[in-house]
Image: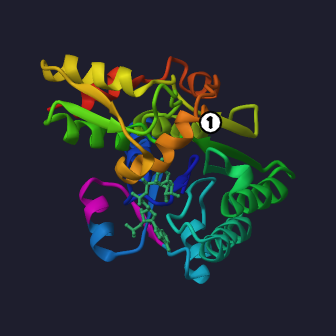
Amino acid sequence: MSGHHILITGATGRLGGAIVATLADRAPGRVHALVRRAGDARAFADRRLPTRAGDYDDPATLAAAFAGIDTLVFVSSPALDPGVRVPQHRAVVEAALTAGVRRVVYTSAFGAQHDPGHATTEGLLLDAFDRDGRGATILRNGFYTEPFVERALAEAEAGRIASAAGDGPLATASLRDLAEAAAAAALRPPREHVLELRGPAWTYDALAAALAAALGRPVAHERVAPEAAGPLGPLQALAARGLLAAETGDLAALLGRPPRGIVDVVRDAVP
Ligand SMILES: NC(=O)c1ccc[n+]([C@@H]2O[C@H](COP(=O)([O-])OP(=O)(O)OC[C@H]3O[C@@H](n4cnc5c(N)ncnc54)[C@H](OP(=O)(O)O)[C@@H]3O)[C@@H](O)[C@H]2O)c1
């Protein structure tokens, strides 16, 4: 294999799939997808994208999957239990070292310092790769904007969206921007080792207004208790306390443009 080869884990998922799509355009012929199932490998092959077979739970598969890869875009496992996630992630880091991977871009999360799975992985990566000409970039992804918009869009049919966020701002990020940022970091290593990727903050009043504009009918924001707000209630409660308000400039710097705001994500979601 010649050239700089990039492998993306979690390639069948929402974020990894979007990273693969972005990189396939920008680095044709050098992008590989990690998959677990033969059917997924065939689907990528139909798009002329090479795959490697690998499972975080089966370390022996990983070193073989990473052979000849220069940059690994490591999308975190969906396993929230650190008892599962940490051994999975340790296996990925060790296999990457064994295989001679030069750089790792890891998609971590907002608040990683307080999350044992992400904090341990970040430490392992910075210890192992921040030396000998290797490198690690930690992208602390903010909460995706899309699930907030998708749920609100479903509710907006009834002319109202419920939230427990009050006037609390949410500095989330669109999945599309996060995918583009990971692709950019894979192609052009940023100077900083740890980046906090969040977009412009929005409120539920602004989301209701954006939905009303996109749908062409009134949409009200109804303030409810977290227990009555559905699966996003706990995050909305954090927003109400001002804990999701902090914006950062890292996403804009990596993208080289302003990140997409709530109006952009609403426009994408409205058919
Ligand atoms: N920022 C946020 O708001 C947010 C929200 C949700 C999740 N996350 C985190 O970000 C990650 C990516 O998000 P997403 O929305 O793309 O998640 P997703 O759509 O659930 O994708 C998860 C990916 O991980 C792969 N995977 C699961 N277990 C694996 C294993 N044992 N070995 C190898 N691959 C495995 C899945 O492959 P299969 O198709 O083979 O199952 C899939 O490709 C998540 O895993 C989670 O850590 C962030």
Query: Total of numbered circles in the picture?
Result: 1
Q: Residue at x 33, y 29 (%)?
A: 265
Q: Secondary structure at mark 1?
A: loop
User: Any magenta on residue 59?
Assistant: no
Residue nearest the viewer, comparing 26 with 271: 271
Residue 227, how many percent across, how many down?
Answer: 41, 52
Residue 255, how many percent across, how many down?
Answer: 53, 25
Q: Which residue is mark 1?
A: 243
Q: Quadrant of the N terminus?
A: bottom right
Residue nearest the viewer, comparing 76 with 58: 76
User: Any magenta on residue 49?
Assistant: yes
Q: Which residues are magenta?
A: 43-53
Residue 247, how many percent across, how many down?
Answer: 61, 25
Instruction: Work out whether residue 88 can be spotted.
Output: yes
Whether residue 23 is situated above or below residue 261 in the rendered picture: below
Residue nearest the viewer, comparing 229 with 175: 229
- Amino acid type, mark 1: Leu
Q: Residue at x 78, y 61 (%)?
A: 124
Residue 243, how many percent across, how many down?
Answer: 62, 36
Instruction: Work out whether residue 30 can be spotted.
Output: no
Whether residue 73 is situated above or below residue 262 in the rendered picture: below
Q: Quadrant of the C terminus?
A: top left
Q: Residue at x 48, y 23 (%)?
A: 259
Q: Residues within 10 Å of mark 1 (few under 14, many from 20)?
A: some
User: In the image, is 190 to the left or to the right of 199?
Assistant: right
Q: Residue at x 79, y 54 (%)?
A: 129
Picture quadrant of residue 100: bottom right
Colour convention of the picture: rainbow
